[in-house]
Amino acid sequence: MLENPRAPHVRSIAKLAQKNVRTERAEFLLEGPQSVGEALTWRPELIVEMFITPTALERYPDLAEKAEAEGIEFEYATEAVIDSMSDTVTPQGVVAVAKQFPTSIKDVFAAKPRLIAVLEEVRDPGNLGTIIRAADSAGADAVILSGRAVDLYNPKVVRSTTGSLFHLPVSVGATLADVVTRARAAGMQVLAADVKGEDLAGYRSGDGLAAPTLWIFGNEARGLEDADLALADNAVAVPVYGKAESLNLATAASVCLYESAFAHRA
């Protein structure tokens, strides 16, 4: 039983809340039964260490069963230790350390994708995690982070994906121009989500969304630069019928991805 929240190993794990430490170690933090459970189900080979309180083990016995089935040893820890390791304010008694596992841009396009979300300089962790979750739900083949996007393994991003991080490939570090070039070579159309674009309702009325599509979503505050928009085949806007000034980026991305998913399955 780990009991001392100031023990060197506990403090070492807590440092994974810092980006430079995550990058140096190529590891990241998983917090809570949802994230840890999804990792155990879909990518157990990534788990380096796992810690759980006796109370959490009683509440989530399936976590221990999954860990044991995969040959992963877990260690008991007190609530105070889990609190010290966690980035969240209200941890749920389960923490794990996992290896980072970004997918190369080459592998993304080698899989002959039909639907990809590209996030150009998206900075908000909650938005990034929510869009990854929406892309997973819509059956997208991959998510690509381009430009100076928020760190994929930021604890808030990981929590916001609710496990979808382990369900589909996510690539980081590519330039938008390179992504678009590869998409066109793979036979995909390139659409940019932008408030100045064509109304999505009108665009979908034909067969505009039926082709394999790469969607580009821009920064929350600035959107896409003119040079970025010029890379796309068309710009498309989600219409606002009520009095709201605009849609949250993650909401707009979800609508666009699902419209493509509907068209692909029609």
Image: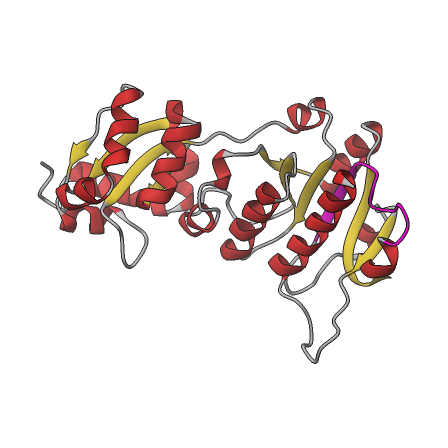
In the shown orientation, is residue 145 left or right of residue 240? left
In the shown orientation, is residue 74 left or right of residue 209? left
From the image, which quarter does the C terminus lie in? top right
- Can you say which quadrant of the picture contains the N terminus? top left
Q: Measuring 87% from the left and 51% from the top, which residue is drawn there?
A: 234
Closer to us: 242 or 111:
242
213 relative to 224, above or below: above
Residue drawn at point x = 82 percent, y = 45 percent: 209
* Residue at (50, 56) in percent of width and height: 126
| Residue farthest toward the front in the current orientation of the protein | 266
Q: Can residue 35 be seen here?
A: yes
- Is residue 199 visible in the rendered image? The answer is no
Residue furthest out toward the right: 206
Q: What percent of the width, then of the height, locates residue 26? A: 42, 31
Residue at x 88% of width, y 54% of height: 205
Q: Which region of the structure is painted magenta?
A: 205-217
Residue 196 coordinates in the image, percent (x, y): 83, 65
Tell me where residue 136 appears, x and y as whole percent: 58, 41
- The residue closer to the viewer here, 23 or 251, is 251
Q: Is residue 244 left or right of residue 134?
A: right
From the viewer's side, name the closer residue of 141 and 185.
141
The answer to whether residue 70 is magenta is no
Prevalent SS, magenta region: loop
